[in-house]
Structure formats: structure tokens, C-alpha cells
């Protein structure tokens, strides 16, 4: 059974831990880790040292005597009052720390012996979305809540506020260790559109974003279409969401497409790719001219008979090739209702090669590192996986789990599987953290990748088996499910056990990211301390405040009230703020 401990105990001043941490700081000041190479010795397999910005953060104002809960869900969590209909958010009590002894027993006094190894933040499933893109499937809303969300026009404001939150944190809430980097675990974009990729890179690295496409002065999406299926915030139309209590907010759409300025992360950040980054709408096989012309063109399909929409959704879940063919017919059919919109070439789908080149663009360097994990060597074969130095003695591995044969579930190819094994062998003396978009249970898509027709695909259970073979693997950190869920992966040899940490999205309720602290307890165990955070936007909303800050608050409240919302996405207490113990020799 999970052991719940008080937050206050976890954050108490501890002189021995402070002195140990200070020693680690002195070590870090001695210089970054040397570039380590895998067995193959190729530059594409090289593991770079930590960026200078990360080393400077550690060597700067590092005061482990003052860890703080401020700005985390240990302190307070946005909460809906009881009742029905549209409800206003309010601050609620924080979530306690839960100690998970599934893989190793907690030993008393470990707080006094601890040595801080690393601290970082995980973003996942930001889904920055161009809501006016003609490819979108809003008319499937009755079949899946992810087809259209009442709040999704505000994703950029919400993401910029999340960046602001991370910048405001003094360090890890349990150790006080400075945040070394942020890792995004995929679905950074929503429609696989070039403009969305640019928005994502600007949110992370800093700058001005205008979340609008098509007409530069007007919104051209479903929220002013007079179709009662969608929430129309500016009109008196009694749409289905207003009947549930959604408000009328004059000026909402104009504000939603107005410029937002992101401060950019003050620490390095890395990028992992997801299915929505790689595939049109996250599920279709790349379809060339029809998809590209429809995305960039002037006709937007926004009303499809319910029975046909349901057939398309059934095909998406079952057979990506059938779904892609059916969707092409939808886009080229002449009899369906379309709306004339302003064409925009920025909506074109991007390829894996485009994704890599955009990350390598100096305009988006931000706090570094250049390429955010990817290097020019990745362009050879468009390989979207890499390894990097997390901290001294800690290595990160970012995987590409998207199957370009289509579908929202994932897998990895044999070449990547072999590379992963080489990398794990090469760093047998380091602690390894694996990052991916898909989870172990959502990697069941073994269809052939059209770009590599002779290559076998491997699912989640094969990957679990491989990770068990290497006692240096501490945790597998991922997203995709939009749900907080932490799973223990035990092994007959306890030193080969590891944790899988799956974190909720930032587009759906409850809109969270996660701070992760890795510590050595000095007793043959490590602890992974996970703490969820919300964006910096105020919990209480003001319908009259249409500033970027006000929109970020509204983004959160609308997501909590969204029809069809899955209320279990916050997870159980054991999936939220935790101490995850794992045995190490």
C-alpha cells in the first residue's frame, strides 16, 4: 500500500543534505561531463555534455536549504465546486506526497543521507493548435471529445503561462536543486502544421506569437459558424454548450487570435516527438497533395452528417489506411458543406526532416542547447531519437515512438531498438532516464512504416523487456494518454526494476506538467520525486479580462468544464506527487 507522508516533513531544512548538495555543486563547477560515445562511435550516437546554461544554473544560486512548495500542487490545486452545469474554478488544498514502496522499501533517515543527482521538468501534450486549419475534424465531436474542445483557441496563451510558471520556480520542491532543463514528451503541435511548429518553438524559446492563420484581422473557424454543435462565445446563439451553462464572452475570438508574448524558458529544453507532430491530425498516413492542398486552401469542411463522421472515427481507430482514404474522399467531395476561408501556406503539413531543421534553426535556440537534443547528424535518415547528458552520471534517452504507417498508437523500428541497446550498454555505469511520447501500453501499432518497408516494428512490451535487461535504467517518462499514471515495472532481480511515469496533458483537464527530482538515498536505493505543477495563470477567472493572462486562466477553467471531459485524468494520489523508490547496487 502507498505510504502518504506530510509535505512539511519532506521540505524541512536538513543541514547534511545541504552540505552534500553543496559538494555536488563544487563537482559540477569543475567542468561538464566529457562527450561520451556509444559502441558504434558515430557522431550521430554521441551524447553531448550538458549545455553551459545548465552548468551555470547549478553553479549559481543553489540553496538546497530552502526548498519550497510554492507554485506546485503540493501547495494548492485548482478545484471545481460540487454541482452541475458550468462551474467556476477556485483554489483548493494541495495534493500530499505519496511514498511508493512497490520496488524498494523506504529506509528511515534517507533524507539525511540524500545526494541530489538531477532536477528537471516534463511538459507533455501541449497540442498547440491552429483552430482554423481546414483539415480539422471538429464535426467528429460527438464521437470523441478530442476532435474539438471549447477552450482550444487558447492553447498558446496557456503554454506561455506554463513557461512562466517554470521560470518562477526556485528549484525542486524537495531538494531545492535548480531545474536543469525542460523536456517535452511529444504532441507539441496538434495538426502537424508548419505554423503550429513555429508557435511551439517560439513558446519554448521566447518571442511574440500571433495564434492566427488565414485572414489576419478575423477569426474563420467553427466558433462563429452558426452551427449549434460548437460554443459561440460572442453570439447569442443557444448552442449546445451555452445550454450547459457556458458563458457569452464578447470579444473572445478577437482576443484569442491576438499576439501573445512568451518569456521563453530560462533553462535549456529538449524535444521528443509525438504522433501529432509527425502525422496529419495525429493519425493519418502522410497523404501528399490532397492533404497539403486542403490544409493551405480556401475551403473548410465543418459540417458532416453524424453517421459519416462516426464511420470515419471507427476507421481511424481500426485501420489508418482506410481512414486516410475515407478522409481524402471527405476533403474532395463536392456535396458537403464547406466554408470559404482565407488560404494560408503556413498551414502545410511538415515532414520529420522539416521538424529537425526547425529545431536546428538559430532563431529558436533560446537557452539551448542548439537543436534541443537534435544535431545535424540526425538529418541523415531523419532520425528523431538521441541521447544527452542530464547531469554528471545521469544520461537521458529520447525515443521516436510514432509509426508513420498511421494510427495514434506507436512502436519503434529495429534500427532504433538496436541503437537504444547500444546506448544502454555504453552507459552501463550511469543512471538512465528514457523519454518517449507513447506509453508501454499504447505501443501496439506494428504496421509497416512506409519509409522503411523491410523494417520490423517493436511494441511496448518488447521495450519493457529490453529496459529490464539493463540495471542502469531508472525510469521511463512519457505522455500520450493525457492521464497521470505511474506504473512500477518489477523484475526478479530488484536492481533491474524501473518506474514508468506518465503525465497528463496541457490541453485537457487537469492541465499539468511535472517536476522530477532524482536523488541517491545513500542506502542502495534511489528516489524519484515527482511533483505536478499548473500554469502561472490565476485560478479565478474574470470574463472581462481578455489579456493573455486572463485567457490563460480561462483556458484552464473551460477545460475543466468541457463536455465529455474524462474526469479520471488527474489520476489517483499515487500517480500525482510521489516518491518512487528503486533499488540500485
Image: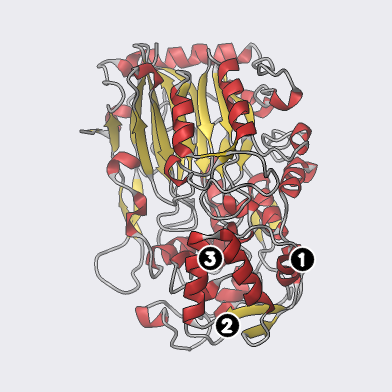
Distance, label 2 to label 1, CA atoms, is: 29 Å
- In terms of sequence position, does the residue under pointer 2 or pointer 1 come before the other? 2
Whether label 3 touches label 2, CB < 8 Å: no
Label of residue 289 in the image: 1
Distance, label 3 to label 1, CA atoms, is: 27 Å
Residue located beneath label 2 in the image: 224
Disc nearest the viewer among 3 and 1: 1
Whether label 3 touches label 1, CB < 8 Å: no
In this view, the residue farthest toward the left is 1
Disc nearest the viewer among 2 and 1: 1
Q: Seen in the image, is 80 located left or right of residue 480?
A: left
Percent coordinates x, y for residue 350 in the rendering: 72, 55
User: Which of these two is toward me, 39 or 521?
Assistant: 39
Percent coordinates x, y for residue 500 in the rendering: 41, 35
Mark 1 residue element: helix
User: Which of these two is toward me, 502 or 86?
Assistant: 502
Residue at 30%, 21% (x, y): give it: 104
Which quadrant of the figure contains the N terminus?
top left
Residue 106 in view of the camera: yes
Label of residue 152 in the image: 3
Distance, label 3 to label 2, CA atoms, is: 14 Å
- In terms of sequence position, does the residue under pointer 3 or pointer 2 come before the other? 3
Percent coordinates x, y for residue 341 in the rendering: 71, 79
Is 84 located above or below residue 418 in the figure? below
Residue at 57%, 82% (x, y): give it: 224
Residue at 51%, 81% (x, y): give it: 232
Q: How busy is the neighbourhood of tag 3: few (under 14 within 10 Å), some, or many (20 plus)?
A: many
Mark 3 residue element: helix
Residue 240: quarter of image: bottom left
Amino acid at each position: 500500500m502507498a505510504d502518504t507522508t506530510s509535505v512539511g516533513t519532506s521540505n524541512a531544512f536538513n543541514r547534511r543534505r545541504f552540505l552534500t548538495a553543496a559538494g555536488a555543486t563544487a563537482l559540477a563547477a569543475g567542468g561538464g561531463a566529457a562527450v561520451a560515445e556509444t559502441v558504434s562511435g558515430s557522431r550521430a550516437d554521441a551524447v553531448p555534455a550538458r549545455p553551459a546554461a545548465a552548468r551555470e544554473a547549478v553553479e549559481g544560486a543553489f540553496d538546497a536549504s530552502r526548498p519550497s512548495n510554492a507554485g506546485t500542487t503540493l501547495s494548492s490545486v485548482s478545484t471545481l465546486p460540487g454541482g452541475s452545469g458550468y462551474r467556476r474554478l477556485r483554489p483548493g488544498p494541495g495534493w500530499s506526497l505519496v511514498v511508493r514502496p512497490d520496488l524498494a522499501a523506504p529506509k528511515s533517515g534517507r533524507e539525511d543521507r540524500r545526494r541530489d543527482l538531477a532536477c528537471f521538468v516534463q511538459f507533455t501534450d501541449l497540442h498547440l493548435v491552429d483552430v482554423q486549419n481546414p483539415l480539422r475534424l471538429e464535426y467528429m465531436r460527438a464521437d470523441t471529445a478530442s476532435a474539438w474542445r471549447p477552450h482550444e483557441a487558447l492553447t498558446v496563451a496557456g503554454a506561455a503561462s506554463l513557461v512562466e510558471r517554470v521560470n518562477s520556480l526556485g528549484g525542486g520542491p524537495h531538494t531545492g536543486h535548480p531545474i536543469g532543463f525542460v523536456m517535452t514528451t511529444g504532441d507539441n503541435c496538434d495538426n502537424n502544421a508548419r505554423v503550429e511548429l513555429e508557435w511551439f518553438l517560439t513558446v519554448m524559446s521566447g518571442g511574440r506569437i500571433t495564434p492566427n492563420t488565414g485572414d489576419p484581422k478575423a477569426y474563420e473557424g467553427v466558433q462563429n459558424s452558426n452551427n449549434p454543435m460548437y460554443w459561440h462565445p460572442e453570439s447569442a446563439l443557444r448552442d449546445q454548450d451555452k445550454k450547459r451553462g457556458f458563458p457569452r464572452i464578447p470579444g473572445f475570438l478577437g482576443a484569442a487570435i491576438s499576439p501573445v508574448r512568451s518569456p521563453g524558458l530560462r533553462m535549456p529544453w529538449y524535444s521528443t516527438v509525438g504522433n501529432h507532430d509527425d502525422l496529419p491530425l495525429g493519425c493519418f498516413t502522410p497523404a501528399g497533395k490532397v492533404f497539403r492542398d486542403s490544409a493551405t486552401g480556401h475551403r473548410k469542411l465543418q459540417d458532416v452528417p453524424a453517421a459519416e463522421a462516426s464511420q470515419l472515427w471507427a476507421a481511424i481507430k481500426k485501420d489508418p489506411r482506410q481512414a486516410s482514404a475515407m478522409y481524402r474522399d471527405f476533403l474532395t467531395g463536392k456535396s458537403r458543406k464547406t466554408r470559404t476561408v482565407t488560404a494560408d501556406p503556413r498551414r502545410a503539413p511538415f515532414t520529420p526532416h522539416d521538424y529537425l531543421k526547425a529545431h536546428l534553426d538559430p532563431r529558436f535556440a533560446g537557452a539551448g542547447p542548439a537543436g534541443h537534443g537534435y544535431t545535424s547528424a540526425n538529418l541523415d535518415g531523419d532520425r528523431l531519437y538521441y541521447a544527452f547528458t542530464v547531469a554528471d552520471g545521469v544520461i537521458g534517452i529520447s525515443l521516436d515512438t510514432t509509426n508513420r504507417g498511421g494510427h495514434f498508437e506507436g512502436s519503434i523500428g529495429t534500427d532504433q531498438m538496436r541503437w537504444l541497446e547500444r546506448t544502454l550498454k555504453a552507459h552501463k555505469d550511469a543512471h538512465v532516464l528514457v523519454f518517449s511520447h507513447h506509453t508501454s501500453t499504447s505501443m501496439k501499432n506494428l504496421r509497416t512504416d512506409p519509409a522503411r518497408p523491410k523494417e520490423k516494428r517493436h511494441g511496448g512490451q518488447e521495450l519493457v523487456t529490453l529496459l529490464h535487461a539493463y540495471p542502469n535504467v531508472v525510469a521511463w517518462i512519457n505522455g500520450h494518454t493525457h492521464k497521470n499514471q505511474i506504473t512500477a515495472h518489477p523484475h526478479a532481480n530488484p536492481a533491474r526494476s524501473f518506474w514508468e511515469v506518465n503525465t497528463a496533458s496541457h490541453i485537457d483537464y487537469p492541465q499539468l506538467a511535472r517536476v522530477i527530482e532524482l536523488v541517491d538515498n545513500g542506502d542502495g536505493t534511489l528516489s524519484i520525486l515527482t511533483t505536478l505543477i499548473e500554469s502561472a495563470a490565476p485560478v479565478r477567472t474574470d470574463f472581462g479580462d481578455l489579456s493573455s493572462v486572463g485567457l490563460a486562466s480561462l483556458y484552464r477553467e473551460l477545460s475543466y468544464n468541457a463536455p465529455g471531459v474524462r474526469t479520471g485524468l488527474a489520476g489517483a494520489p499515487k500517480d500525482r506527487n510521489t516518491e518512487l523508490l528503486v533499488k540500485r547496487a
